[in-house]
Image (cartoon, helix red, strand yellow):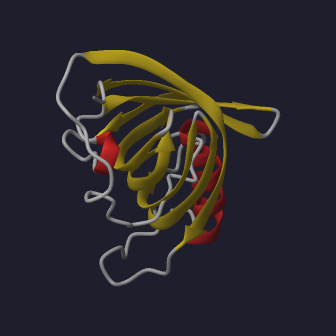
Amino acid sequence: MKTLSCLGVALITAACFSLGLGSLMHTYANLSGQGSIQKGTAMPTQATGTFEVKLIPQAPDGKFEDATLGRMTIDKQIHGDLEATSKGTMLTAGTDVKGSAGYVAIERVTGTLHGRTGTFVLQHTGTMNRGAYQLSITVVPDSGSGQLVGLTGKFNITIADGKHSYDFEYTLPEAH
């Protein structure tokens, strides 16, 4: 078995590559009382921008005794059509096979999306199979608050030249 330190470096690299984590990402402010949304026709929209992420490995707490398992906190700063912060937790699993790993993460995003303020939660599921990765990041149903009530969507991450960018395809009821 690999040691936690070697595995940690590999998993952080894999997570950053596949998740663009910082992710995974954010402040637990409750904005549900701010702004108002009236139900209307949902309109598909796209938001793009960049983000920085810090992944901080957490010490084992007795629940993760196996050296292949890890836990990290996520702290993100998101810029562009979504101006936000994010905080979350990631669980990782590594293997003895180079390039194979998996992770799950939950992060709460707090900020402004195309002028509408509130919070929402993103759920991450990622795997790497000998270097080939598969990633799904979706808005948790009914997690939107404030002016983001009713938000649904998929958050896609691109990492190029060491920089993280996002393409967020979402639907949100029209504000009235």
Which quadrant of the structure image shows residue 68?
A: bottom left
Left or right placement of residue 44 versus residue 78 in this view: left
Q: How many marks?
A: 0
Q: Is residue 94 left or right of residue 76?
A: left
Please tell me which residue is depicted at 45% across the width and 67% down the height of the picture. 71
- Give residue 134's position: percent from left, percent from top: 46, 28
Judging depth in this view, the residue of 172 and 136 nearest the camera is 172
Q: Which residue is more in the foreground, 63 or 85?
A: 85
Direction right: furthest residue: 161
1 left or right of 162? left
Q: Is there any visible trace of residue 3 in the rendered image?
A: no
* Residue 153 placement: quadrant: top left
- Horizontal and vertical percent for residue 54? 64, 61
In the rendered image, is residue 63 in sight? Answer: yes
Quadrant placement of the C terminus: top left
Where's residue 17, x and y in %? 63, 39
Q: Name the one closer to the observer, 171 or 63.
A: 171
Compare residues 15 and 121 and report the one nearer the observer. 121
Residue 14, horizontal then vertical, whole percent? 60, 45
- Where 44 falls versus 154 (above or below)? above
Residue drawn 30% across the image and 77% down it: 63
